[in-house]
Image: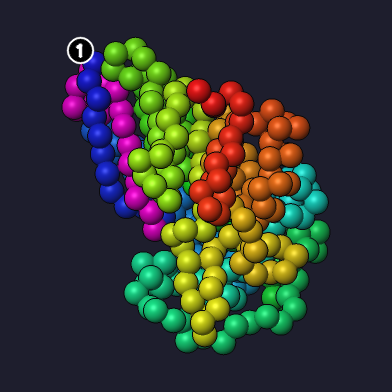
Amino acid sequence: MLSEYNYHTKVMGCDFDMIFIANSVEIADSYFTQALQVAQEYEKRFSRFDEQSELSKINRKILSKMSDEFLDVYNIAYNLYKKTNAKFNPLVQVARIGYNKSFEEISKEKDINVELKNEQYNISMDDIIVSQNKITLQDTQELDFGGFLKGYVVQRIVEEIKTEHGVIINIGGDMYVQGRDEKGQLFSIDIINPYDEKQSINFSLQDKALCTSGIYRRKWNIKNQKKHHILNSKIKDSAQTDIISASVIHKNGVMADAYATLAVAEGSERAVEFFKAHNIDFVIICKNNVILMSDSLKK
């Protein structure tokens, strides 16, 4: 008999929540073990805060050969960079505006006493030299794949564990939903409204990613200047935006995550125009609790 099994832990600096539909707790436990292993492998490889991660070593120019996994993620980033005319840019460094350690540590400080590094630095991906599996970053260049990595990982987990029944993998609000629940019905998903959780947006989802980016949680002050983690590549600083949170539904986890991030950086007018032109489902919550969404999600 099919049942729903729920799991919770932490990974990649975020809550890691999983739902598995399975015939037994033993099967569900095996799915959880596989899912956690995949997530931890990507965290170990791509963490900015681990000096021994592959990403950190490449950024510090002490490693030039990329693993196949790193090359795959890098190529995704480069394609996004080209597709968005450099608006999506993994070379823009949030560490230069204070996010230079885990958010758990940053959140404990009322005001971060660091010197803002606003000097010019190279954010052209076309200046990076890649030959087969070797990569050479230019002076001042550092990569950060946080703008889409969780969306990538949640889908990779679903693909890796090959569950027979329904599954939801959720890392910090970026999720992939596959299959159906224990009753054979579509999973019911809520997008939380930061202004009022009673106004959450509910809909059904199957075999797609739902990724959310927002500026209402990961924020901090530096010398009384308000900062958040979603950057505008033109100014190399926290985006000045009317969007509080943007959620995107897409069959591809990378695209859902990247588009949600880009929407916040671009603002609601450009984001809505883009989503409607490309027939992408979205929910955008703006300042003053203005809610915008695609027609297909309206009840």
Can residue 132 be spotted in the picture? no
Q: Is residue 227 above or below residue 163?
A: below
Question: Which residues lie in the magenta part?
Answer: 13-28
Q: For this rendering, which residue is in front, 147 or 190? A: 190
Residue name at image x 75 percent, y 65 percent: 234
Residue name at image x 75 percent, y 71 percent: 122
Question: Crowding at label 1, few (<14), some or many (≥20) Cα neighbours within 10 Å?
Answer: few
Position of residue 186 measured from the top left corner of the image (x, y, whole percent): 40, 18
Q: For this rendering, which residue is in front, 148 or 293? A: 293
Q: Is residue 97 magenta?
A: no
Position of residue 11 measured from the top left corner of the image (x, y, whole percent): 36, 52
Residue labelled with disc 1: 1
What's the amino acid at mark 1? Met
Specify whether 253 is left or right of 176. right
Scheme of colours in the image: rainbow
Q: Is residue 24 magenta?
A: yes
Q: Is residue 178 above or below residue 40?
A: above
